[in-house]
Each structure stands twice: as C-alpha cells, then as structure tokens.
Amino acid sequence: MKINEFGNASVDIIVSSISLVRTSPCGRLEHLLPRRPTILTPEKKSLAPLICLLRNRSKQSMMAQLLNSSFTPTSPCLRRQSMPSLTQPTSRKLQIQAKIREIFMPALSSTMTEGKIVSWVKSEGDKLSKGESVVVVESDKADMDVETFYDGYLAAIMVEEGGVAAVGSAIALLAETEDEIAQATSKAKEQSSSLSLSAAPSSPPPVETKIPDFVPVATVVKPATVTAVASTHPASDRGKRIVASPYAKKLAKELNIDLSGVVGSGPMGRIVAKDVEVAVVAGAAVAEPTKPPSVAPGIELGSVVPFTTMQGAVSRNMVESLGVPTFRVGYTITTDALDALYKKIKPKGVTMTALLAKATALALAKHPVVNSSCRDGKSFTYNSSINIAVAVAIDGGLITPVLQNADKVDIYSLSRKWKELVDKARAKQLQPQEYSTGTFTLSNLGMFGVDRFDAILPPGTGAIMAVGASEPTVVATKDGRIGMKSQMQVNVTADHRVIYGADLAQFLETLAKIIEDPKDLTF
C-alpha cells in the first residue's frame, strides 16, 4: 500500500464485502456500499487519483440529494470561523432577556380565562427565591398562591390588588439583580398602556359580597370592631396594604376584625387565621362586649354590580349547558332505614351527604351509562372512575367539590374527606382536581326544606340529581292499611344524547333499593 498525492491509499487489490462507515480525509462520514472485489491493473493504477476524485464527488452528490441541500465547504478552519458568527448574537440576546423576566397570570383551571389579584405576598424590591409564593390569585373557583420559578427581585407590580388580568398577560416584572430594578420599572411603565385588563381601581368598587383586600372591614361594616394594638405592622407596605391569607380575611370579615391592627405570625409577617383568633381574644379582654345589631349589609338599590370571577364562570357554564338536550325523571324513595342508620353512625362523624354520595356511587357502579359523558357530540366515554361532585353554596357563588372513587372508599373516610373539602371550598383553597373531575353531580336543597326541584346539567357530565327534603308522608301499606313513612323526592336531569329514559328508570330503582336497605353503605 502507498499514499498518493491526494492523501488516499491505493493498493493493488481492494476487497469489500460488507457495508462500512468511515471518515474521509476531508472529515466527512462516508457510507461504503457493498460492491464486488475490484482488481487494479498496472494500466489503471495511473488513473487512481482521478477515479478517487470522481468517487468523492459522486458521494457528495448523493448525500446532497438525500439531505435536499447542497454541500458547503467542510474545512475545519472555515467551520471554526463561521460558528461564532452564528451563535454569539443569539447568546448575547438571551443573556439580555434573562435579566428581566415577566411574571404571567397563570391558568389555574381549564376554564379560567382571567384572574383577579387577591393580594401580593411580596412587595416591590423584595428579594425572591425559586419556589417562593409571590401573589394570591382568585381563579373562577378558588384562591391560589402563585410561586416564582426564578431567583431575583420583584422589580415592578403591573396589576395591583383587586385588578383583573387575562391568562398569560404580565402582572409583574422580576429583575435578576438589584441594579436592574430601575430598568424593569421603566419597562413596566412602557407596557402599562398596552394592557387590556390591568390595575385595580383607585377608589373602592361598589359594595359586593367579597370585600376588596385593601379596604379595612371596619370601613364597610357598621358594628364596632375589635382591634389589637400593634406598634408596627410587618405585613404592611408602609401602610399601603395588608398581607393576609384568604381564610384569615374571611374570618376577619365574619368576626368584624380590623386587620390593620393584627400582627401576623406567618412568613414575612403574613396574617394567618390563628392571628385573627388571638386578636378576638385580646380585644374581648380590653373592650366591653357589644352586641352587633342584626342589620343586613347595605345594598344600593338600582346599582349595577359586575360579576365576580366565580359568578362569571358559573354564568358561562349555565349558558353552555343550554346547548345540551336534556330530560328529567323523578322518583320517590322511602328513607326510614337511611334515617335510622344516620342516627346510629352520626356520632362517628358520618354526614348525610356522604351517605347519599356513597349510595349514588354504588348505584352508578351497576349502571355505568349514567356515569358516562359526551363532550364532542359524536361519541361518549364510559368513565373509569365514579367521582361524585356535590354542589356547595359559598359566598358569592357555587362550587362542586368532588368525592373521588366514592364507590370504593368506606363511609367514614368519605365523611372525613367531605368535611375537608367543604372547609377548603369555603376558604377558596380547593385545587383544580378537587372540583373539576366529577362524573356525576348531586345537588341537595332538602336541608332548606325544599321538597323537590330540578337541577341544570353541568357541562361535560352525563347527569345531575336534585335531592329534596325527607318528610313524613301518609302512605298505603301492602296490606291495605294506612301508615306513616319518611319519603324524599329525587329528580335526575340527564344528557339525552347518551342516557335514555329506561337507563334512568333502572338507575333510580337500584338507588331506591340501596337507600331503603342501606346495609351495604357501611361496608
């Protein structure tokens, strides 16, 4: 073997019997296809350089066709010169963008289109760490803490407390270093004019059921308030606003506590529920107890009050449900045995709501079509889990906490879970999976003495059952005598695209048997 002037090896006999991949002298990967052994005669040896050149060009042409692009010079020196020119501007641009980041309004649920700023946990200029809570946002169903994904400084707040912003829009700017806060502030001023939904109103909005966070309760409710004296307020930003958990604010509203005088014990001086309770005890020891007059909150007649975020979500869902063809079926169920069981196990923490949910889930397990759902109008789904959503009325709206896998969970665990969900619902702390995963819905107005009513079908589910009050009723017994039994009326509204009258009739018959003989509910 010898090396010619092209840097290629020429030999008298070259044998190739398998497909190989090697690196050519120019630095490219070449694919050597199987070919028959080639014998170079002395006459052809003089043409070896030309043959090598033609083969290299032929391989380049084939690779260009495969890649659908032409070959460029592959000299190492050329590559070293061209690569920095392509990468340096991009890296420089990314470095500049990484210094000031936007904090966006997150989508906290699948139906959320905009969110309301309940309170800012941090103030402008505060140092932030990754994973730290920055702001509390009110979605269409709950109040949730929003965390930061980066370290830095909260440079500028673009949407104040009480303001509304669309999902995906910027609500604040995060500076990487303290020196860039001024630059971020100027950038926020430039962007403020382009925000379609921004900034809380300078004056308090019309009185609603939910009091804005920055308005002390004492300025809205007339009864005398109980306050605890504090020299400095660690949770306030120079007196501009007070940082407190949503449940603490709700508790303060119910107990007529002015949060401006409460000292917070939470992170960064944030006021939590126990701080409000301490303020009540301390205030009762100082001030004479006064009985607040039983006067309803003042409502300005003739005023126009905009929907809250939750009311807006309920409105959209109700309008959407009008596009679903529904029908209704009623059934009367005797509840004497269920009432006796409830009286027996109530001391153990069992609730009637949990009993009804358990009975409904066991009936749905035998009639899966009633637990199905249709979303696109072309097909329906047999849901793999039986998740019972139960309607709960809360301040300013309605929400449906979900008892997941209700057919598989024992009645005692189900009752504990229900109490936990109700507490979180009233504090507006439910997570999306805790209120948006229902496959069948219960609405119970029997506790208010309502004997019967019809419920509107929630979008995305197959049926909803309205439960009336259980009342003593005069009935005829099987032997022809007149007796007294407790009975309740249930009415089911169903999607007629999936569920038919016979399906509901059979489901209600099974439900009645379970309630009238509830021995399976405690297993």
Image: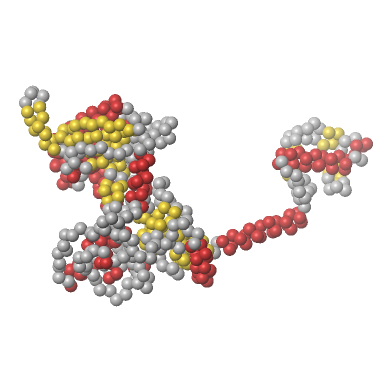
Q: Quadrant of residue 41?
A: top right
Residue at image point 40% right, 46% down: 111
Q: Position of residue 259 (x, y in %)?
A: 28, 67
- Quadrant in the picture for the C terminus: top left
Q: Quadrant of residue 280?
A: bottom left
Q: Is residue 209 above or below residue 60?
A: below
Taking 27 as reference, is 407 left or right?
A: left
Q: Position of residue 183 (x, y in %)?
A: 53, 68
Residue at image point 34% right, 42% down: 318
Residue at image point 23% right, 28% down: 509
Taking 456 as reference, is 514 left or right?
A: left
Q: Position of residue 62 (x, y in %)?
A: 76, 38
Q: Is residue 146 above or below residue 289?
A: above
State the residue in front, 283 or 77: 283
- Quadrant in the picture for the N terminus: top right
Q: Residue furthest right?
A: 43
State the residue in front, 116 or 427: 116
- Is residue 488 visible in the rendered image? The answer is yes
Residue at image point 37% right, 32% down: 382
State the residue in front, 269 or 20: 269
Q: How is the image coloured?
A: secondary structure
Q: Residue furthest top?
A: 479
